Amino acid sequence: MKKILISLAALCCAATMSAQVADEMNPLITSMPSLSIAPDARAAGMGDLGVATEADFNAQYWNPAKYAYMYSKGGITANYTPWLRKLVSDIDLAYLAGFYNFGDLGGGIGASFTYFSMGDVALTDGDGNTIQNVRPNEWALDLSYFRKLHEYVSMSVAVRFLYSDLNNGVNTSMGGATEMHPAWTMAADLGLYYRQPIELKSGTSHFTLGFTLKNLGGKMTYADDGSSNFIPASMNIGVGYEIPLNKYNFLTLNVEANKLMVPSRLSKYAPDQTTQKYTQTEFSELTSATGWFQSFADAPGGSKEEFNEVRWGAGIEYSYNKQFFARAGYSYENYYKGNRNYLTFGAGFHLSIVTLDVSYCVGLAASNPLDQTMRFTLGFDLAGIKDLVDNRKK
């Protein structure tokens, strides 16, 4: 019997592809893993990071507090990623975002919509006969508020609605034993951003620091038996430094760390200390808050394994006159936590009201399904469009 979870298995295969000894592999598994996919080409070109980078149209995903330092009062962006193209041909991620800044005193609002399509999947019975074809999908809709607290500091809060439909309704292929239904939940984010100018002989540089808590919300329940899974709550911190080489040339360096606030299935807190592994029932009984706090100290390997759960990203961006951009980055994840290690490259173009970015991924692990992944971003400066229209009227 083919189950609908094959689509999620394809999405998460990068997190288990390198396992050789089952007892040593202990990745953190979540529902709606699509929430952890970097949706935009700029961040993807710099090693999948964006918590502390200079503000851009896609700050809604990474850290909406950055919007307070945008050069424009408003903007919209569209992003597209053909996902896991080395494995399948019809999995896609689309991301739309926008913001409007009311000013230093009033702050502003941001919003985004994420849609993840898992392609066409055939539901079959126990004999392998096709019952129906479905198109599983997940989507999220969020709204944020941001404002400056100080000349150098801003913050943001966001609320998010999450919806995941793995089989377009009840999974009849499971014979009625455990029927599956669409799942939904709510979540919230908190973001902080620090940006301080530093005067150099070559011009004004900027030191940036970002911190976010993302997807703090309820669990998702798909089945009638009450089994539930955690969404990818995470703590993210990053630093960046933009260096003016001269009047027209700039270089930006960024480093970020991401820690999933999700408990481990192989855990020293599991009731069965022989295997140290939660059963599905025991795992489902953990509350969201318990999972967040427990995730920092539950790994069987102690502090060393907890540190190995941190995913790192490092990126560099070169810009000429803030119009032409070249990017490179590296994303690292521990071998036993997923081994998603890859280099990224990207380029961008910004002129007047239009921004265009593209990125490319080069997998470093053997048979990495993320290899050759491309992302595309198109953004529009709404304030620039308004000025252009006003000038034409004169």
Image (spheres, rainbow, N blue to C red):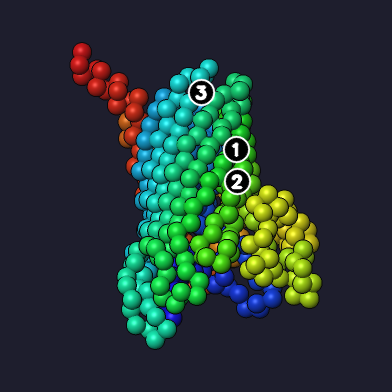
Q: Residues within 10 Å of mark 1 (few under 14, many from 20)?
A: many
Whichever of callouts 1 and 2 sits on the residue coming sooner in the sequence is: 1
Mark 1 or mark 2, which is nearer to you? 2
Q: Are marks 1 and 2 in contact (CB under 8 Å)?
A: yes
Residue kind at label 3, given as amino acid type? Gly
Measuring from the top left, give residue 225's x and y in whole percent.
Answer: 56, 67
Residue in the foreground of this view, choosing between 213 and 358: 213
Mark 3 lies on residue:
107
Amino acid bearing label 2: Leu
- Report how many numbered discs are placed on residues in the image: 3
Instruction: Identify which residue, 318 or 90, lies in the foreground.
Output: 90
Distance of mark 1 from mark 3, alpha carbons?
15 Å
What residue is rendered at 47% in x and 69% in y?
179
Pick out the residue farthest to the left: 393
Cα–Cα span, label 1 and label 2: 9 Å
Q: Quadrant of residue 125?
A: bottom left
From the image, tell me which residue sits under label 2: 216
Which residue is rendered at x = 39% and y = 28% of the image?
74
> Percent x, y for residue 242?
55, 34
Residue plotted at (53% across, 46% down): 186
| Disc 1: which residue | 190
Q: What secondary structure is marked by label 1?
A: strand
Q: Nearer the viewer, mark 2 or mark 3?
A: 2
Identify whether 278 is placed above or below 361: below
